[in-house]
Amino acid sequence: MPDIQEVSVGELKHLVSERAIQGETVLLNMGPQHPSTHGVLRLLLELDGEIVVSCIPDIGFLHTGIEKNMEAKTYQKAEVMTDRLDYLNTVGNTLAYSLAVEKLVDLDVPPRAQAIRVILVELQRIASHLIWLGTAALDVAAMSTFLYCFRERESILDVLELCSGQRMMTTYIRPGGLWRDAPVEFEQAVRDFIKIFPKRVDQYEALLTRNPLFLDRTLGIGKITTADALNFGMTGPGLRATGLAWDLRKTQPYSGYEQYEFQVPTRAEGDVYARYLVRVQEMREALKIVEQALNKLPLGPVRSKDHKFVPPPRSEIGVSMEALIHHFKLWTEGFSAPKGSVYSAVESPRGELGVYLESDGSPKPYRVHWRTPSFDNLQAMPLMSKGVLVADLVAIIGSVDIVLGDVDR
Amino acid sequence: MDKNLQTIVQKLEKEYGATVSEARGEVSVTVPAEKVVAACELVQGHGFELMSTMTAVDYWPQENPRFHVVYQFTSVSQNLRLEMRVPVAGTNPSLPTISHIYRNANWRERELWDMFGIRFEGHPDPRRLLLPADWEGHPLRKDYPLGYEEPQFTFNYEEIDLRKPYAKE
């Protein structure tokens, strides 16, 4: 049996204060199996009584080598791995990857596919924020919100299942369009959700927004300024809660976001409560986008006609020699991308989700790098949690909204 | 190219000997390794508040340069993006740290040490980030094999289990 190495204070001397080495403060391990760390995050806390002197995150427990694995697969097959990164934003991950591949090989996406992409990604944003709302409220002991949030999330996952056959690992958005057109029941299912959801958000707000217990746990906790947030690479709702309206859907629109009217909610305080308000408002805005996109959902194809990159429809294979050849080539060798590199980013529920893709001209990506928002947001967490109580630290972890699959990749 | 971007790119060209390329609407500058810190300070001084990401590409078996370290900067105030590439040689690859300029470079540089074996001089916390401390090799290098696991079925479960490298009771 191999020896399991123990971590000694000597190794971490440069991270903790002098008082910890003298034995005046206590070093306490929180996680990796701790319910409030939202997965497998380990925090090494230096405590002075109940007060956090410093907090050292230790990550990598969910590292799965996705970047290395993607290098060994063709562009189409590598996409399946993207769902496994941020498992609460699976549609968003495939969108980020598809946009990067489309930029690399210069593919056009039909308008119907773009609109369906936007609808699904925004629904996924709501689902992700619902999980966040449920678990973050649970961390500060609001149990019932959790149950309500998961009820609504399930109806969103039903829509994803309707389209792709899968609740979570959808791989529905493909380079050049979608896997297939949305079924006829799709529109009604989304309309039903649009009808009930605003009332449900009101219900969550009735439970939390003016709840004195919730306010006590969140107001003024975990403050961060805009300059610090940017310097730590923080993006998404955490950055917008410091007062900066930076949203890639507005500033660098993709997939036709420029056609839709929506607000970018911001707050100036930069604390846990501000992050809560921003996310709740974002759910309402996301629903507005879904409704607009559904109202003007164009008809037409959902996949690019460029069969050098997108497989031809099954019906053509039996009658067209060329389609048969394309189909065979695409599923054996795959398509080759021209040499070069691209960086393409989308606004995921957690912030800037970027894909760096480099091609050497072969059918497999030479290098895929994921700029995952949770990774950088988590780095800012030690700064937010200096001098707070351990109980408040739990509220701060919840408010940052980390997904460990997104951090560790 | 955007006007503001042009000024900074020209400065990088003139002062630090950078070469500029533009492809697919993205501007990329290649800066020599010894000028990284100064170039990053210049970039930050010109309104690029956010370092979106930092990664590396391994061009093995090419040796000089074997790696490219790629920085992606974002200017929130001017809505611009800039890529900076830094070639790094294959023997004892190292670069000066920029974690005092962009603080999120701290984990990114640890990740690059972990995955590519690129040292960052002056880094405040030069440990591995994602892999265990006693891991051998740097997985994202191209000469590191992908690896695999033997699938276990009922007929060969125990046989494979015996030689599986994990801690047992």
Image (cartoon, rainbow, N blue to C red):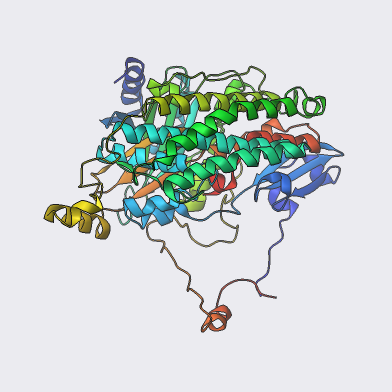
In the picture, residue A317 is in which quadrant?
Answer: bottom left
> Residue A135: horizontal and vertical position, in percent?
69, 40
Q: B120 above or below A387?
A: below
> Residue A249: horizontal and vertical position, in percent?
44, 26
Which residue occupies 44% across, 21% down? A250
> Residue A310: horizontal and vertical position, in percent?
26, 47
Q: A73 above or below B20?
A: below
> Residue A7: horizontal and vertical position, in percent?
71, 56
Residue in front for this viewpoint, A214 or B75: A214
Q: A373 above or below B126?
A: above
Inspect this view and state whether residue A236 appears.
no
Decide if residue B83 is on the left or right side of residue A36: left
Task: Locate the C terminus of chain B and report the quarter of the image it occupies.
Answer: bottom right
Inspect this view and state whether residue A93 appears.
yes
In the picture, residue A298 is in which quadrant?
Answer: top left
Which residue occupies 37% across, 31% down? A115
Which residue occupies 58% across, 53% down? A62
